Image (cartoon, rainbow, N blue to C red):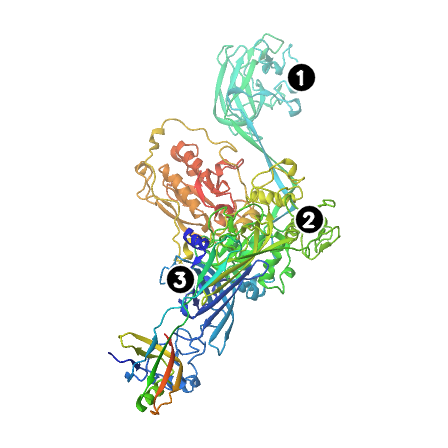
Amino acid sequence: MSETLWDIWESGQYVGDDFSNARVTIQKAVLKKFGPWRSLVFAQDEPQYELPRLNLRSIRIDNRHQSDAATMTLTMVNQIEPDLLANLDENPVGGPTPRQQMDLAQPGYYTYRRGITPESVDRFGHDVDPLWVDMFIPNRVIRTFQGYGTDGAPNPWDDTKLILTGTWLIDKVDYKTDGSITIQCRDALKLAIEQRLYPPIIPVDQYPLEICADYTDTTTETFTSTTEIHHEGIQGGNVAKILLCSDGYISGNTPWYGCNASVYGHRESHAFDGNTSTYWLSMGNNGPNELWSFEWIGGRTFGEPVNKVRIKPKWGGYKYFIAVMENGKWVDGPIVPYGYWTGPAYPNGSNKPYVKTGWVPKSEAWFEIELPRVYNADQVRIIFTNLQNSGLGSNPYRAALYEFEVLADIPPRTEIIKTEGTREIEFIVPGNIADYTDIVKVLAAWSGFYWPWGQTDQILENWLTSEDLLTLEQVAAGFTNQVGRVWGDFAYSGAFPVDPPCIPASFWDNKSVMDGINQIKEILGFICYADATGGIVWRMPNIWRTGNFISGFGFIGQDSIREIDETKVLIDYGVQIDDANLRSEIHVVSAEDPTLYTSIRPGWAEGEVVPSAVDPQGDLALLGGQDRIMLVPNYPFISQAEVDKFAYLVSLWIHWSYRKSSIRIPGNPAFEPDDQVRVYERITEESYIHYIQGVSSTMDLDKGTWYLDVDTHWLGNGPDQTWVVNTYQDMPAALYAYLRAIGEITEDGDPNDLPPDFDPNFDIPDFPDDVPRLDQDLGSIFPDPPTVQYPYDDSWSDKDIADNIGSGYVTPPTNGSGGTVNWRSEAWRYAYWGARGSDLVTTTFMYADPPPTSFAAQYSHPNQTNSVRTTVPRASLSAWRLVAKAFVAQQYNVLSCAAYAGKDRKIAGTNTYSAHAWGLAMDVNPFSLGNSCCTESWSSWYARPDSPAFYAAIQDITNIRTNSSNTRVFGWGGFWKTKKDYMHIEIVCTRTQIQEGVHQG
Amino acid sequence: MAQWTLTDYSTGTPEIFTFEWNPNKFDPPGRSANIVAEATSAPNGQTLLFQGRDKLRKSTFEGAVGSESFYTDLDTWKDKWYPLELSDDQGNTWTILIEEWKWTRVKRRNPWRFDYTAQVIVL
């Protein structure tokens, strides 16, 4: 409301140009269906016609929140303004002339069937005015505009001196022979009152209606845990260990002497002890090169990749053969020519295939033997012939080694050990609502409060099914299934059904839509009414702090308390003290579960009218000690918090009923139910703040009078003084937390005043923004479809990351740094993003025109495009555009693929649907060589995940946040703890969160 | 001096009646505003004024008739139930609806000597 109008109102002089005025329009309307939704607002594609002001007699509006709908009664004159000097002998349609009928002003001109029957022409000489035929009948839409004066605007909604005071649906029309028409209407909630929760209001495929919130269940699953063991790299190290006796022969000596037995004090282990003064000595032979003169020693090498043998020989001069066992078999090659079948030979195992042979110099220096290749060797043997004369024994020809080594060149590696087990896991069973308010939204949209433009309401999207298709005509008119919301102003409650999480179908059956809404209203303690535009207002009553906070046509400023001064505009005032509704105790018991109950004793606040005796306390004192108990047994509460909250709210309303007042003032649309008002009146000693329960506006356009009768109850003793709700000790903790979360209570105050079980670190519910009211559009009644502007613009900086070339790699991100891994389950995606593959829109993901120049020459490819179309959920469009922008800022061209691969896309090697199946993930290939989307294509430094440019882009992307709750929007596969996927970018927030809007954090 | 006239447009062709004698008494149409006053509850409070649609404007004129034709014609014209245009001797015109017409026979030798009082609604 403008200050000008307020000043006129306070002046009390409603004369001259400031006369009390009304203009009224009427319009034909049939609810238009958009899929399962119905729209009253957009049913009105018929023009509005203004009723001649001279015909208006009176307008009476009764609006109180205890009623399901406000009512309006309009009386008007059923004739037209006569042409004073008209020819009374002419009647263009035939029949009696006006002179014969003595009809001067065509009485009955607005009667709904005038002129359309033969009798009306023959008998009455009535003509048809197509404008008004069938106009004044039920369910036409009437709008009332009231105020003081007029600026002469052609359309009432443009008249700055008038305010829209209601959007009405006609209930009943009385035509009378006294020339009057009386039209009775209700506001738009008539739609909810008169339509019932059966098909087709409920879509057939949703009936019977079961509403559930998400809930958590558990199941047992088999899982495989993976343990990684890191092995350090070894370069040139000796991996050889002495063979085990259990393996059989550990050298050529074993058949003669036994395992690691002493030969003149020398053993096999001396060749492996790292001591170059001790040595292994073979058994003796009678000649250096007899057929049987072959001696050997070998070592275990554990499958390591060996490529050298190093020995420190005693005497030297041997001919050697190297045999290698790999994967349990001796590597093929020529066989060592050991004559094991000959006389003194005892088969000592020398006859193995060898991979290399040669001569050991006649020296005792270290000697290295390069193997033909790298063997993952289990065992390596060195076999000697051309034995040397040791001078020991009768057969002195022997072999001897100080040390035997097998060298490996082992890179670092990771060993993965998988272990299977079982565990109990929780999973989310997705519901179809997240808040009680969602129920009201859906019911409202079904019954006629759908608004088909602008930002899409998430809850409506969730309730769409594939059957809910628009007509071709609607599609041609620019409507889509996905766009739309509910007309009104909805506050979220932060509450939803729990334990059980579902509201059964029986809860809704045989109820009107309004009854369904009222059930939820009682659970939450909310109010529900239709505002002047016909939109639903759904919220907590305005009782928790001083001020008026809902904008609207009557809105005159935040925190404003409407003040009524007895010397200015107060015509009449009365205060009633009435104990009729007062109760000493209130007991609320859940109808669902009698173990859920609470009892409360209403009390008063300091400064309130109380008996002089203050013992007993509370309303029991106001009742003079009478015990009046109230039992509320019929509400199907399903949690203790709901019972507590309801009992507390009931106690407040009952207590407030003790003191009520009625105010008569000149008409003023700024006074609406749920507003607070302060009255100053001397006889009743009134200066308190009151809550408006209802208003009755009566305008007589003949007399020029316009009265507003306001019914209130007492709220508190001044804005800065005692309030009824000034201590929170008796308040349920859940209610207190909720009021804190929505800003109705802003301070904790004295800790002693808090609810005893209140947790100061309570979890603030996730409250989506209220549905916008589009006030800016309401003036024209038929707003043009708003143009959706995405925050992305096509500009990018000219940053040239060539400066970074050669500056070295940045440190790759480690687990958990730069972003929390949000690994979301299928259940999570279904719950928060709906069915797979639904609500997808094909869009241009990447847009770089002209293409970035810095890398164009180096990285251009014939198959590369710089405008890639892919498919994501509509709600996520703005967020993906920020992803594109982040890449463009780093001068990448992005070739996207697999953003949405259809309903059957599953995680490779599993039976689990991938996030791609929801359109929630996109694999990007910044390098974009060809059409490859594989991580193996990271063949350039610039496209590596640890390059500065790519990681800078990822940092930007993982810092994209939602506007209100500042929730991270994207996760990156490079942050995954186990199997990293550097090309994978995935949405990790909910649709509701992303609908807050997004920004580059 | 111009004569008073009544004009009837209802036939499509204006029909004019000219008064033989002008009325001898005339209360021209005035204005009657429709004001409702309400007192605020405080004795020292302001008065609230609501202005509605103006009340009907009415006018009366009186005169005398001295001839049969004048009487007969005027008696016919007074029965017209629809708006007429009234023009006075100063050239002022109003659209009127005759609400009340009272004849008074004056006992003179002239049998057509009547006085009349007319009350009209000014549209």
Q: In front: A287, or A683?
A: A683
Q: Chain of mark 2?
A: A
Q: Where residue B65 sits: x, y (%)? A: 33, 86
Q: In front: B74, or A761?
A: B74
Q: In front: A280, or A682?
A: A682
Q: Where residue A563 sits: x, y (%)? A: 51, 50
Q: Amino acid at mark 2?
A: Pro
In the displayed structure image, the side of residue A340 where residue A552 appears, left or right:
left
Task: Give the crowd class for mark 2: few <14, some 14-19, many >=20 residues within 10 Å.
Answer: many
Classify residue B59 by image quadrant.
bottom left
Task: Give the crowd class for mark 3: few <14, some 14-19, many >=20 residues within 10 Å.
Answer: many
Q: Amino acid at mark 3?
A: Pro
Determine the secondary structure under disc 3.
helix
Q: Chain of mark 3?
A: A
**Residue carrying label 1:** A257
**Residue carrying label 2:** A602
